[in-house]
Image: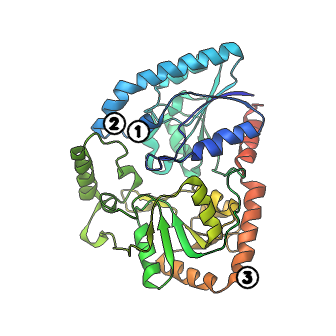
Amino acid sequence: MRIFYASGKRPNGALTDSRVWYENLYLSLVDLGHDVVEFDFDLEPLLAASDHAVPANAAYVQQHRPLAERELLRQLRVAHAEKPIDLFFSYFYSSCATAQTIAEIRSMGIRTMNWYCNASYQLHLVADIAPAYDWCLVPEKYRLADYRALGANPIYLQEAANPRIYYPRQASRDFDVTFVGARYADRPHHIKALVDAKIDVHTFGPGWLDPVGLKQIESLSDIPRFATSPRAWKRMVARAYRRLFAPERVQPVLPKSVCGPMLSDDDMVAMYSRSKISLGFSTVDSDPSGERIVQIRLRDFEAPMSGAFYMLEYQPEFAEFFEIGSEIVCYRGVDDLVAKCEYYLTHPDEREAIRQAGHERALRDHTWQKRFTALFEEIGLE
C-alpha cells in the first residue's frame, strides 16, 4: 500500500528533541513493507497552537494553516501523480488543516485516516476535522460514541510500541523507583508520599526541576504550548490558577534530589532498564463533576516492551491488555502505591517474574506492526 504520512514527530512541545511519533507510527508502517511518503513540512508550530481558546494560538493558526494546507495538497498531488496514493494517514489537530482540505484529498480518490490520542480530555481539538475523514483512529474506547455524535467514523485502535525502538538495554538497576513524564495533576502528591515513606524515588520530565508556572496547573490542557510574550504566559497561568486551584490543592514541595531533567528518547528507554520499579499514572484531568478522567498511554506499552517492571495507576480497561498482578502491577490510590513499592522492592524474584512476563506480552500482542496489520485487514486495506 502507498501511504502519504503527515504528522509531527514529538508528542508535545516541551519535548523538543523527541521523535516518538516518527519512531512509533512512521517506522512501523515502513516495517510492514508499505511505500510511505512523508509530508515534508514542519507541523510542530501548528500542533503547538492547537488550543484556539488561547488568542495567540488562534491568530497563529489563521495566518499559517493556509500555508501548510497549500503545501500539503501540492506534495500530495505530486506524489499521487508519480504513483497513486492509497491512504492519507495523519496525526492532525484542527489547527493543522480544515475539513475542506481533507475533503479535497478524498476527492482525489485517496482514503483518509487520522490518528489522535488525547480525546479523553481534548476531543474539541479535532472536532472540526474528524467528520471529514474516512476513519478516525481512537484509543479511548469510551469516546467512540462522542466521535459518532460529531458525524465521524471512529475505529477503536489502542496504543502500542515499536520493538525496534523499545527494548531492554544492558544496564544495572541503579534506581529503585522512577517516573518519566510531565509534572501535573496529582503526580506530585503521589511522589511526595513515596518521599515521605523514605522510598528512593526519582522523576524526570517537564516541570519537575523548575515547576514555576507548571506548579499552578493541574491539567495538560492548561499548559500553554504557544505564548508570544511573557505577558501572555502570565495571563494564561493566572487564568489556570483561578479555575483549578483551591488552597487545599497547593502542590507539594519535593526535594531537589528527587527531581530530574527531561530525558532524550534513548535515555527514557534506558531508564526502564535502570529502574527496579517504573511508575505510570492514568489520570489526565477531571470532568466538571470532579470525576477523574483516565486514559491508556504510549508509556503503558513502551515501558513493558523496554523491559520495565511496570506499576500503573489502576483503570479497568488496562486488564484487556495485560494480566494485572502477573504481567504488570496496578495500584489504587496513594497508600496502595506506597505499600506496593515497599513490597516489590523487597521481593526481587516476584518483581523479576512479573517484569519478564510483561515484556513477553508486550512483544507478543502490543506492537504497532500488529495493530496496523489487524486494522488494515479489518477495513479492507492492503
Colour approach in the figure:
rainbow
Element type at mark 2: helix
Location of residue 153 (image quadrant): top right
Q: Given this view, does label 1 or label 3 mark the residue nearer the observer?
A: 3
For disc 2, the marked residue is: 57
Crowdedness of circle 2 by 10 Å Cα count: few (<14), some, many (20+)? many
**Badge 3 element:** helix
Q: Nearer the viewer, residue 204 or 370?
A: 204
Q: Which residue is nearer to you in this view: 147 or 91?
A: 91
| Residue 322 location, quadrant | bottom right
Q: Is residue 156 visible?
A: no
Disc 1 residue crowd, few under 14, some 14–19, many 20+, Cα 10 Å = many
Which residue position is annotated with label 1? 50
Residue that badge 3 annotates: 349
Q: Position of residue 221 (x, y in %)?
A: 39, 50
Three-letter amino acid code at disc 2?
Asn
The kind of residue on which mark 1 rests is: Ser
- Mark 2–mark 1 contact, CB under 8 Å? yes
Provide residue 271's location: percent of width, then percent of height: 59, 65
Residue at 71% across, 54% down? 366
Could you tell me the amino acid type at mark 3? Asp
Which callout, 2 or 1, points at the residue further toward the start of the chain?
1
- Which of the pair 296/57 is nearer the observer? 57
Q: Is residue 264 left or right of residue 372?
A: left
Find residue 361 and report its horizontal and vertical position in percent: 75, 62
On screen, residue 141 above or below 124: below
Residue at the spot 23% in from the left edge and 50% down from the top edge: 234
Work out whether mark 1 precedes mark 3 in sequence or the reverse, and give the earlier one. 1
C-alpha gap between disc 3 and disc 2: 51 Å
- Please identify the residue farthest to the front as the structure is shown: 171
